[in-house]
Amino acid sequence: MANEIMDRNNLMRNLFNGDSWMNNFPSIFDNNFPEDSTLKTDIKENNQNYELHVDLPAVDKKNIDITYDNNILTISGHRDSFTDHNDKDGDVIMSERSSGHFMRQYRLPQVDQDNIKATYNKGVLEITLPKMNKEINSGHHIDID
């Protein structure tokens, strides 16, 4: 199972790195944007299940939505606990926390979608996706009359 993640911000920073006239202009790739807004995920697979552990710190459970459709698991939601990014007193040195919507999809085929289980504890979403029985996946032989 390959789940490729690309940090587009670092790619753009490296592209314009060095003594370039571009370095003197404000960039949409500055540290005003989260360094990596991808949901950090661990995925394990065994003969019976796929198991996902997804870090969702400071996200309220009621703001998380999980769906499974056409072999795609989608995790989406929003975090609105960090809404004050103003620097009224001029004392903010760095601001990396973000608020807003998030979504990530994973291709996990042959899942028994009626028995998917999810729990959320201390900022970690755990999802168990049981695989379909081999008998169901093996197909059906059709005799010719």
Image (cartoon, rainbow, N blue to C red):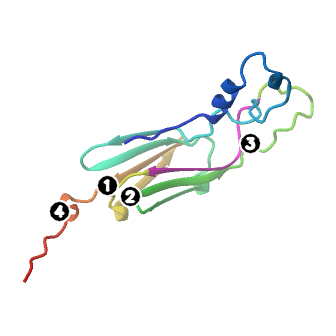
Q: Which residue is at 31% across, 58% downward?
A: 110
**Do the numbered discs 2 and 1 sit on residues whose CB atoms are within 8 Å?**
yes
Secondary element at tag 2: loop
Q: CA distance from mark 2 to mark 1?
A: 6 Å
Residue 74 against residue 11 in the figure, above or below = below
**Do the numbered discs 3 and 4 sit on residues whose CB atoms are within 8 Å?**
no
**Do the numbered discs 2 and 3 sit on residues whose CB atoms are within 8 Å?**
no
Q: CA distance from mark 2 to mark 3?
A: 31 Å
The magenta stretch spans which residues?
95-106
Categorize mark 1 by other alpha carbons within 10 Å: few (<14), some (14-19), many (20+): many
Which of the marked residues, 3 or 4, is nearer the chain's N terminus?
A: 3
Q: Which residue is at 92% across, 30% downward?
A: 89
Categorize mark 4 by other alpha carbons within 10 Å: few (<14), some (14-19), many (20+): few
Number of the label disc, if any, that sits on residue 135: 4
Which of the marked residues, 2 or 3, is nearer the chain's N terminus?
A: 3
Q: CA distance from mark 4 to mark 2?
A: 19 Å
Which of the marked residues, 4 or 2, is nearer the chain's N terminus?
A: 2
Which of the marked residues, 2 or 1, is nearer the chain's N terminus?
A: 2
54 vs 29, left or right, is left
Task: Look at mark 1 in the image and give the residue it sits on.
Answer: 130
Q: Nearer the viewer, residue 68 or 11?
A: 11
Q: Amino acid at mark 1?
A: Pro
Secondary element at tag 4: helix
Q: How far across and down, in percent of the image, does residue 95 sit?
A: 76, 31
Task: Look at mark 3 in the image and give the residue it sits on.
Answer: 82
Task: Look at mark 2 in the image and give the residue it sits on.
Answer: 116
